Image (cartoon, grey):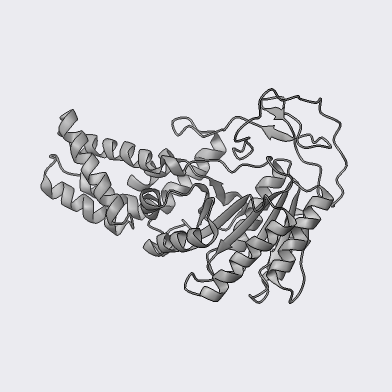
Amino acid sequence: MFSFFKKKTPPPAPVVSPPAQPAAPTDGAPVPKGPLTTSHFAAPAGGGSLIGSALVIPIDIPDPAAPRPERQKWVDKLKASLGKTASGIATVFGGSVIDEALYESLEDALLMADAGVPATQYLLTELRRKVRDSGVTHPIALKNILVALLTDLLQPLQKPLVIGEHRPTVIMVAGVNGAGKTTSIGKLTRHLSEHGASVLLAAADTFRAAAREQLSVWADRNLVDIISQEGADPAAVSFDAVSAGKARGKDVVLVDTAGRLPTQLHLMEELKKIKRVIQKADPTAPHEVLLVIDGNTGQNALMQVRAFDEALTLTGLIITKLDGTAKGGVLAAIARERPIPVYFIGVGEKLEELETFNAREFAQALLG
């Protein structure tokens, strides 16, 4: 079960209507695995309930101690992807005593992993305090304490993506060129479709050559509709997509925006314009503003988070390309300085290589 269908604040004393029979798809998409009602998703037999028009399913945060087989396969891939960083940190704990040299080596290792100065100083300060209070003397025990500290630091990033409070739920996706934004939209479309959501894509990246065609390929693979206009204004495409999503009764509208650097002020203003125009089509939208970050960019990723958050007020992150060369510690830096939820992390190009973020899984993979 995926964990991103959850009502944030249920209204008091809801009246639950019995689910209707599944409606036939109107956009060429296959009938979803879970039943649908004409109002929204029907409650599954295994758990969850209907509140108003939204599906409520308890958050399914994987237990690292006993993950399901497919999750374990993905966790193993994550560990392999972060293996170089993990092995570098693990060597710090290879001695037999806890001394000042160990702490200095650990500081160097965390900085080399892109954890950043504030997060590294926080972790070392807390680590020294816990070692002093507990009286542990062996480096392996020290490592276990560090895993727990890093898990606690990353915990605010572990939140589910909420779908169902609004129909359609409008998700605006931003990111710099080459971060994997359009590919992530394709993967996210697949996950949403597999869990019974009808999705409409908006090809609002009208600046990059072939961006519209690339998104159309993802639309064809996932059998979903797409709003696309060659050479059109990005804000106009976004407006048309939100309007079409409302008219067609879609559950989600995913808006692909042009990749840009935060230093390109005129393009950042274009992003703000897209957000304003979306609000003209739906005053409550966009309901989610996601930033896609390349996990290989290190501390530059933190700079991107700051800049895009100030321009758009981000609600979530997708971390991509954690597949061999990425150091991974930047998530600690983000958690310490700008704790925006990480909805998904990706370790490759395949559709199934985008998964929900789990703080303890990531901490264990990063520290080895």
Estimate the x, y position of residue 278 in percent, counting from the top left: 69, 59
Estimate the x, y position of residue 137 in percent, counting from the top left: 14, 33
Q: Quarter-wise, where is residue 141 in the image?
A: top left
Q: Nearer the viewer, residue 362 or 120?
A: 120
**Residue at the spot x=37%, y=57% of the render?**
327
Image quarter of the N terminus:
top right
Q: Is residue 217 visible?
A: no
Q: Quarter-wise, where is residue 173 in the image?
A: bottom right
Kindly give the residue lying farthest to the top in the view shown: 13
Q: Is residue 343 above or below residue 64?
A: below
**Residue at the spot x=80%, y=26% of the render?**
17
Q: Is residue 301 visible?
A: yes
Image quarter of the C terminus:
top left
**Residue at the spot x=74%, y=62% of the render?**
239
Q: Quarter-wise, where is residue 22 in the image?
A: top right
Q: Is residue 349 toward the left or the right of residue 112 in the image?
A: right
Estimate the x, y position of residue 143 in percent, counting from the top left: 26, 39
Q: Nearer the viewer, residue 213 or 173?
A: 173
